[in-house]
Image (cartoon, rainbow, N blue to C red):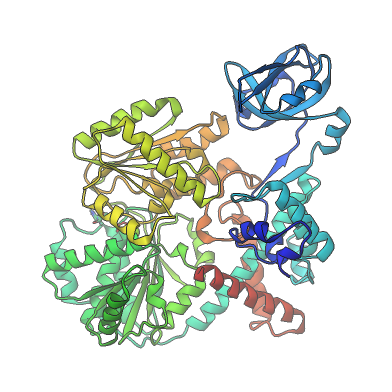
Amino acid sequence: MNITELKGIGAKTAENFNRLSVYTVSDLVGLYPRDYDVYHEPVFVKDISHESEHTEVAVEGQVCKSPDIYGSGRLKILTVTIKDYNGDSIKCSWYNMPFLKNTLRLGARYVFRGRLVNKRGWLLEQPKMYTLAQYKELQGTLQPIYPLTKGLTNNTVTKAVAQALEKYSAGLEKEYIPDYIRKRYSLAEHNFSIVNIHFPKTMEEYVQARHRLAFEEFFLFTLATLSLKSANEHIPNSYVIPESKEKDQFLESLSYSLTNAQLRTVSEVAQDMSGEHLCSRLIQGDVGSGKTVVATIALINTVIAGYQGALMAPTEVLARQHYESFVKGFEKAGLDIRVELLVGSMTAKQKKEAYARIADGTAGIIVGTHALIQEKVEYKELALVITDEQHRFGVNQRRDFSQKGKSPHILVMSATPIPRTLAIILYGDLDISIIDEMPANRLPIKNCVVDESYRPKAYTFIHKQVASGRQCYVICPMVEDSEAVEAENVVDYTAMLKKELPDIRIEYLHGKMRPSLKNEVMERFAAHETDVLVSTTVIEVGVNVPNSTVMMVENSERFGLAQLHQLRGRVGRGEYQSYCIFVTGNKSEKIRKRLEILNKSNDGFKIAEEDLRLRGPGDFFGVRQSGDFDFGIADVFTDAKTLKEASDAAKDMLKKDPELKLENNVYLKQKVAEYTIKCLEKINL
Ligand code: ADP
Ligand code: MG
């Protein structure tokens, strides 16, 4: 059922919903709140602290001075001072609502709930007013806050969801997790959980709903992955690939020698590829640990054995970067290996030529984005498939890719620092190698966490670094979950920065730009034709410009620690001392503490674990850690325990009913199939 059938949703609003990938009422119900507004008990003015700055705070008080209106023309600001029971006062202000003057008579008593800011003293911005009775009613409840896009208000989404649930029972269905599992892991019912994830009346209900839905996701995920594994497990090796002397020739041409961890991984991969069974292995290593060279060696061996190898990257920028470094690297090593690039922004003619060289085997190594798995591409003899930054792809894409050939070897590279125990579950269908050692010549990155007043100093610092020949990144604030807004920020920020640093070459990069334009900007930066790159997180993945030494992140509190760690990984990749400046607009103690983790450690695994410890398993609010795995509600870090439980339950279930053939599991089997398809669709977007 299309969302336009809901009352109050016309074509215009539907379009806005579409931008959030919501087309049907069941999509709508699947749009879970990204946060909740909790109506806390009103506080006394004396108890207000920096902790609550920029959050909604309620104060019960009495108007103690007649309202003031100042400003003129379109912007009129009304302020009023209220006193709480203790006689302590606080100011409230409203923009463009002069009519409130009549409500806010001297002596009027309300609960004022607004955003707490510090403007030479505490102030509540745009507070809503409630009578005491009204507020009592709301107190303790959780009001959903939905992901929004331009033109769509939270109120519209809330009403639409309520309607879809009540009138059409959207998203509600037969229970498909068996009772014995629900009992064992104390899981709420599916339908209860769907309703209560949107409109929990108490924190308890919310926690139960969320737990069930997270479990459900992991459960389906594990069932899907495990069926893949059993399909893969005993595939014989159709491409036996020995180690080559050309690989040594390549290693000798490098300006460094491999770390022990790299050597170990290289040999694990070589053993797989020359062994009896197909190689399907995850190479996990922190940012900058040098995964690319391990992949390169496997590719060289493959080509020398007479086959083709492909490397797929999540972005064009990254694909091009790999391509260039292969071409240069092989030239330097004196290896005659033909590398082919295949990305979406190439012209039709270029693509056609590339297809031809791939089909007739002229191309030995093919590097690209998911253009590599389009139907038109035919490989001559594809024996090795490598995906870089794999977490950006789903299980299914991996499978699709490997179906391109006669079951090629599979290598998956990921920098997501997840503890081994979790990796084993999340990559259940793969063997794992871990590169747990950094190249020795690296200077540890110097970090600092600062507030916005530090900006001028940061700019001076950037200026100095540029003057000494280095390059810098500035990552822009994500104000909203909207790409359009994000783009605006980057553009505005760049204009501002150009004024601040007029003699420096600055360019910007964001997700809304045409791919070819993105490439040009990135190439100019890589070639050191620009000094500073202002960007959204599009550069988060894999980009390698070793001359960059400063990473400045605005509004760093809005990112997950894992993501910040990835961003930081863009610097400190060469011989120069590098710096990371985390700017935060939020003074809350908790946020500072989290950022301090980054300040203290450069080790991704430690950071992930420390973050987990600090939040505690019950702390779901705030920034999601790992958008990487693209679970709808579950979070690999926060829900680590649930992940473990769901995976145990899935394994247990498959032991009893390996193909989910029992009558009780028929519906579950269908859900697993649906889940798999949903993942596929997400990827094809
Ligand atoms: P990642 O694991 O994040 O993909 P890369 O493979 O891009 O890291 O490597 C990061 C940088 O480190 C590259 O410039 C690469 O040439 C360099 N590098 C890789 N291995 C070593 C090593 N053993 N010693 C010194 N530098 C290395
Ligand atoms: Mg990489």
**Closer to the camera in the image, 390 or 97:** 97
Quadrant of the image occupied by residue 490: top left
Quadrant of the image occupied by residue 520: bottom left
The answer to whether residue 263 is visible is: no
Q: Residue furthest right?
A: 133
Quadrant position of the N terminus in the picture: bottom right
**Closer to the camera in the image, 517 or 236:** 517
Q: Residue furthest front?
A: 73
Relative to 32, is 168 on the left or the right?
Answer: right
Relative to 161, is 53 on the left or the right?
Answer: left
Give coordinates of residue 159: x percent, y percent: 77, 52
Give coordinates of residue 265: x percent, y percent: 32, 66
Question: Which residue does the image show at 63% across and 23% down from the upper left?
Answer: 49
Q: Is residue 574 above or below residue 129?
A: below
The answer to whether residue 650 is visible is: yes
Q: Quadrant of ligand 2?
A: bottom left
Question: Which residue does the image show at 41% across and 50% down from the upper left?
Answer: 566
Give coordinates of residue 642: x percent, y percent: 64, 58
Give coordinates of residue 391: x percent, y percent: 46, 62
Relative to 671, is 316 on the left or the right?
Answer: left
Q: Is residue 680 above or below residue 307?
A: above
Picture mark count: 0
**Closer to the camera in the image, 677 or 218:** 677
Question: Which residue does the image show at 76% across and 56% down from the upper left?
Answer: 8
